[in-house]
Each structure stands twice: as C-alpha cells, then as structure tokens.
Amino acid sequence: MSQLGALLPQLRTAVPGPRSMAFAERLRGVESRNVTYLSPHFPVFWEEAAGVNVRDVDGNVYLDFTGAFGVSLAGHAHPAITARIRRQAQTLTHALGDVHPTALKVELLERLSDLSPWPDARGVLASTGSEAVEIALKTAELATGRSGILSFQGAYHGLTLGSLAATARPEFKEPFRKRVFEGVVFAPFPAGGGLADALAAVERALNEGAPAGHPIGAVIVEPIQGRAGVRIPEEGFLAALVEMAQRAGAVVIFDEIFTGLGRTGSMFAFQHERVEPDLLCMGKALGGGLPLSVCLGPERIMSAWPQSTGEALHTSTFLGHPLSCAAALAFLDVLDEENLVERADALGGEIAGRLRSELDGVVGVAEVRGRGLLIGIELASAGGRPLEGGGAAVAAAALASGLLTLPAGDAGNVVELAPPATMTSEQAQVGVELLAVAIRSVLDGAPA
C-alpha cells in the first residue's frame, strides 16, 4: 500500500469536512477576522503532510500544487530534513544568535556563499522574506546614502513597513499610507510586452528620483513576479535594468524569495538571463519547512554595515536559529543529491505542456505560462478582460476534488502552481486533469 506522499487524492467526506468546519468556527472566535478567509466552502485544516500529499483533519488526502506557498520544493516532511531537525532538537533548539551563535550558522552561511555569484559573499540571516527585503533595503541605503527606491508595478515584497513601501498593491498600503515611506517610484514590469516603455520609465526614475525628491539608491525586482500572477519579463529586461541601475550608482536587489533555490529550473531565476544582482534575497524553500531567510551580497556592498561593537544595527532574537539552520543545511543536501533543480525544470515543462494540451481551445484561458515549477494559468472573461476572482473560484473547485491551488494576480484571475519537485509523473498527470476540470467548470459559469 502506498504511503502518504505518493498517494493520489482520497476524499472521505465533503470538502470541507465536518471537523474542518468545526475548527473554522473555533478559529473565528479567537483570531483576528483579517487573517484567515472563512466561508462555508473554505478552508480545510491540515493535520499531516508528506511529499506532495496533505491530509486534513477529516482524513481527506490532497495533492498539494501550492507547495505551501512554494516552501516545500523538496516535498513536505522530507525524511532527511525531518531527521536532521529531530537530531538538532535533541541537542540545541535556541542560541544567542548574534552574541554566542552556533556552528550551524557558520556552516549555513558558508554554503549559501558558495551558491551565490560572489566569491566574497556576506550574509544576514532572518526569519521571513519580508525581513530579508528590509535588510536589503537598509543595506542599499547604507551603501549609497540614498533613500529612494525603484520598484515595479505588480511587485510584492512583503507587508512589513519597509517592504510594504516597495509592494505595489494599494489594498495592502492604503490603511497605513501615513506610515509608509513615500520615496518609492513604480515603473512598468514588461511582462508580455512594453519593454521600451518600461526601460524608459526606469531611466526617468534613475535620473529624476522618487517622489519628494529622494534619489534612487535601491532598485528592487522579482525576476519573475509570483503573487502578481507568474509574470515573466521580456527577454533582455533584467540585463538592461541591472546595467542602467549600476551605471546610475544604485544597488540592484533581486527578490528571489519565491523563485530561488531551484523553483524555476535553475538555482536562481536571474541565471536564466545571465545577469548578476548586487544583493540577493532568499527564503521560502531555504528553511526546508522552517522559517528562514537571508540577504546576501558581495563584501564591497555588505561592508557598508559598520563593524559590530556589541550592538548590531539589524538583528533579531531568532537570528541563525539552530533548528532552521539545521533544516536548511539538510535541504541544501537534498537539493543537490536528488537533483531537484533539474527535476523542477523537467516536471515544470511536463505540467505546463499537459495543461496547454488539456486547455487548448478553452474559451477564457488566456495563457499558460511559467518557468520550472512556477506556473500560472491566466483566466479572462469572454470580452478578454481579466476574469476577476477566477483564480479563487478555481481554487475552491479544485479543492473540492482533492487538489490544492492558489489564486494570484492583481484581479485574482490567475491560478498559481508551485508544487514540490518530488511528485511522481502520475501525480502530475492526475493533478493536471483535476485542475483542467475545475477551470472548465468555473469558465462555463463565468459571466460574459
């Protein structure tokens, strides 16, 4: 009998089941209403996960095509990673990360330095992607003396106040507008066209600065915009952006929290265009399922931070957390030993190809796009406009059949896939079939 991880969907109850619905009601009574979306049809509460499978509290088994927000590139509860966490938990679970650290912090930073494009890389560890972005923005300001930021339309860099300033979506920013830094300018992101206009806007921003007269010190970009709907820039954009920004004396930050460490079929997404950033942010998959992120850069830029005299300008209680560092070292081993980068490339091509075949000619499917195991299916109305909320409707329909997906895009009209690289070909095929059925059902009922 197959074990959890290699299973196809198995539904024992309606989705969500009675226990998930009971937990939803209990959660409603204790959590801020802003956090978890609750409805009669959503969510399910997870109880166990392994490989590509998730089992909920009602015993239903799902295929996870979200990778838990892209975290589980090596699959849920990979045996080698969980074994390393277990061993570490028996010896040391916490240390004084910036006072009396562990050897694990040194080993992890050495491994990450070896993966980076710089022979003299220096890093700052953190817990979340937003914090890694905060560190990068602070580094850029220290290195250049300029506080202005150039970001891009559709950008998502996090929700802490610094990273929120560089995030484009107004619904996240408006309630806190008076507290969010205003020295940020947003240029077009040339996905599907508009390369010349985007580069002209970049040139203008670098010359004129951000609002309120802030000269640009940081240029922050996702080499593929994830939450905006898996938007891939036109070829040549990233290379031109780096050249223009560096010529203007700005620091180029590549936010690879989602795309880095093999997700797109190369170690980093910037390698597809053979460019090199000044700073690199990683997270999500890095911790092997535990919270961990990092900002890396060459010594010439990272030395803008002063030498510690006992007080660090940026630190945190859980910096270099032993459990997370141990999990990350195990993940990096698995990434190499199981050829997950190559598997992401091959599996991503297989899934995208099957989706294009299944959805060929389906009215309302505007595009299937992606790189490696980061794939987006864009939905449109009969009039060609983005099908607002279509991604969420598909996620709900897919969930009812045993498949986990997420919506993306500013209009919620993209179905986003970021599954583990450990799935079987059969799981990929069944997942695509279930998703195609869910998409057709939503589009059949969509307004003209």
Image (cartoon, rainbow, N blue to C red):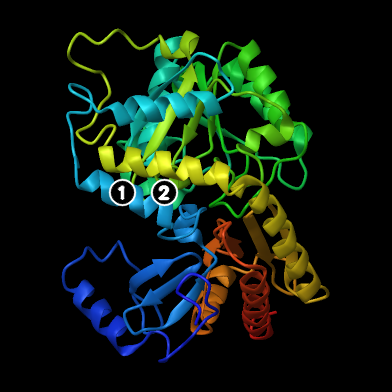
User: Mark 2 sits on what residue?
Assistant: 288
Left or right placement of residue 199 versus residue 10 in this view: right
Location of residue 244 in the rendering, given as x and y in whole percent from the top left corner:
68, 18
Q: For residue 259, say whether it is visible.
A: no
Location of residue 447 in the rendering, given as x and y in whole percent from the top left corner:
65, 81
Between 253 and 444, the one nearer to me in the picture: 253
Q: Nearer the viewer, mark 2 or mark 1?
A: 1
How many other residues sit within 10 Å of disc 2, few (<14), some (14-19) or many (≥20)?
many
The residue located at (47%, 47%) in the rendering is 285
Between 5 and 246, the one nearer to me in the picture: 5
Q: Is residue 404 above or below residue 101?
A: below
**Which quarter of the image is occupied by the C terminus?**
bottom right
Q: Quadrant of residue 383?
A: bottom right
Dot 2: element: loop
User: Mark 1 sits on what residue?
Assistant: 85
How many circles with numbers are drawn on the protein?
A: 2
